[in-house]
Image: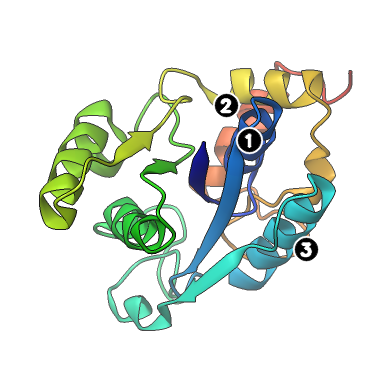
Amino acid sequence: MKIVVLSSGGVDSSLLMLLLKKEGHDLYPLHINYGQIAEEKEWNSCKKICEFLELRKPQKFNFPDIRKIPSGLTDKKLDIEKNAFLPNRNLLFLVLGSAYAFSINSYVIAIGILANPIFPDQTTEFVNATEKSVNESLGKKLKILAPFITLDKREILKMSIKNGLPLEMTYYCHSGKIKPCGKCISCKERIAAEKEVPLKK
């Protein structure tokens, strides 16, 4: 099956690509540059993971003007944790992903949303509503896969280790720095998970 996979360069989307490839699907990785502070690191990780998995080179869509919408993910002047919400970010990803999928005659998009949602665009209800809206917009039946939506970061790390995903190739800090900041939501989630999951086979 031909599937467009939203790939940030992080462990969630990287594991998603690995597992879908193991199932024999034809993957089209798509990376979105929305003006995030960590874009350079995320894009580099995305490319490395795709190369490691022997996938086609990822497509990159650039929408940096979204940084005009205040968020700690795109503006270094704002608090990277308290102001982390970027309105409609996942909706934007899925709309762009569906347009790209339509253009290559694919009707499946995959996104690595996890359980324990912090924001409203990370829920099963959001995914279902977006799928319905996209189908109405395209006039076609398109499926949004979110297979990790009942899993947390600990389970993702365990699965990554079990399946041989090189975690050192992935990137997770919102600060865009070489050394993780330890302050952003992503860092805190990863640090908490690593306390319970030794990063070794």
- Could you classify mark 3 by the number of other residues whose Cα lies within 10 Å: few (under 14), some (14-19), or many (20 or more)? few
From the viewer's side, name the closer residue of 43 and 188. Answer: 43
Indicate left or right for 133 with 4 as reference: left
Marks 2 and 3, how far apart in space?
21 Å
How many numbered dots are placed on residues in this image?
3
- Residue depicted at x 45% and y 41%: 111
- Give the mark, 3 or 1, whose residue is nearer the N terminus: 3
Mark 1 residue element: helix
Discs 2, 3 touching: Cβ within 8 Å: no
- Callout 1 amino acid: Arg
Marks 3 and 1, how far apart in space?
15 Å
Residue tagged by mark 1? 190
- Residue depicted at x 41% and y 31%: 146
| Residue mark closest to the camera, 2 vs 1 | 2
Question: Residue 188: percent from the left, percent from the top?
Answer: 57, 39
| Residue mark closest to the camera, 2 vs 3 | 2
- Callout 2 amino acid: Lys
Q: Is residue 151 above or below residue 67?
A: above
Residue tagged by mark 3? 178
Residue tagged by mark 2? 153
